Image (spheres, grey):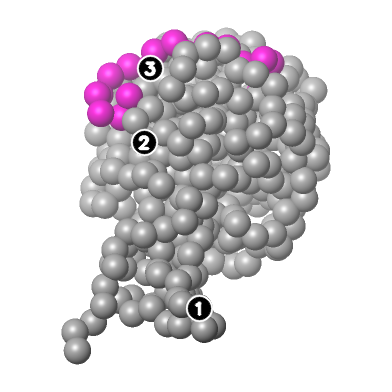
Amino acid sequence: MSEFRVNSITNQDGSAGPQVCGVSTFSGKSGFQIPSGSSEFRRQDGGGRGIGLTIAGNNGSNTSTIEKIEIATTGNAVDFGDVRVANTAMGACSSSVRGLAAGGQAPSSYTKNIDYITMASQGGANDFGELFEGRDWPVGLSNDILGLFAGGRGKNGSGNGNNIIDFVTIASTGNASNFGDLIEPGGLVSYSHGHPQKYYRMSGASPTRGIITGGVSPTYDRSIQFITFATKGDGQSFGTLSQAHAGGAGCSNSTRAIFGGGYSTYPSLTNIIDFVTIATLGDAQDFGDLTNSPRGHGAMASSTRGVFSGGATPSTTNVIQFVTISTTGNAVDFGDCIAALKNRTACSDVHGGLAQ
């Protein structure tokens, strides 16, 4: 008898049955569960799609640690592996198969490195290629094909703002190419409390559109802009946040993007969460509040949940918290990171930029 193979079947939240490539096993008398996702990418640990990764960070010194959670559950993070070099202030994006982490300070200079992580295989990152220009705090966003890294700090090797949007094809390897530019000019600009123009941004995505917002410019910025994945080009105006979220974190399902935490103005941190409907231009609306007021934290999402991890309040924290994206309301406790770190980044294999 030939094997029975079913590809690309999943629950909306990305969680589903026993993960044996090509063969489903029975669970009780009433029937069986079919593996989720493409059988080509079945996870080795037996889980379905729905993992979130929190990557690198700093608490006095840089770390290479990658921590994993199961987004549909609650509980503490577990060790997944390491990026290639101890790093901080990276940007991350992902497909349903791979996570990419790029840029940062490793150990103290702006790096061009792009690492890739195979989401199905617990372990270390591998070399993917390089960004066009080394920088920390590039914001990552993606659909299932393209990964983009926008903005950051490190123009021409300096501490100045950068408006470049780089892109890569996630399934391949190689150096990034130019996608376009963010609306705001980079270059030599004035500083606000040591923070140069337009880094500390946040992002979210649907399969067709990416959202980029926040930053320091040199005042704390509320503007929202968008790009269209299918068309290379510059950012376009979308709307305005309810307040600044410099150093906050963003994530999305395919309909909504949410942005939480960060500086409202230096040195004041906020716990407010804003949301936008990705397909509709307009200003952000109030979603609720985080359980604390972090900056430099990571954010990851499934089709149902947004999860925020770590950061500094201003002391570093290991708190993981989540919201249900389709509703509004305050975040609740999820669990704890292994380590209390700031300047983290995060990604998942079921975020809003991917076909659900």
| Magenta region, residue range | 228-245
Of pointers 2 and 3, the one earlier in the residue sequence: 2
Label annotation for residue 307: none
Q: Which mark is residue 207?
A: 2
- Majority secondary structure of the magenta segment? loop
**Image quarter hosting the N terminus:** bottom left
CA separation in Å, label 2 and label 3: 16 Å
Q: Amino acid at mark 1?
A: Ser
**Residue 207 sits above or below residue 84 on the image:** above
Q: Earlier in the sequence, mark 1 or mark 2?
A: 1
**What count of labels does the image hold?**
3
Residue 73 lies, in percent from the top left, at 65, 60
Place residue 199 in its image quadrant.
Answer: top right
Q: Residue furthest bottom?
A: 1
Q: Which is in the foreground here, disc 2 or disc 3?
A: 2
First along the sequence among labels 1 and 3 = 1
Looking at the image, which residue is at 63% across and 67% down? 78
The secondary structure type at the circle numbered 1 is: loop
Circle 1 residue:
30
In this view, the residue in front, 107 or 350, is 350
Is 108 on the left or on the right of 312, as rendered? left
Q: Which residue is mark 3?
A: 235
Q: Amino acid at mark 3?
A: Gly
Asked whether residue 189 is drawn in magenta, I would say no
| Label 2 neighbour load within 10 Å: few <14, some 14-19, many 20+ | many
Q: Amino acid at mark 2?
A: Pro
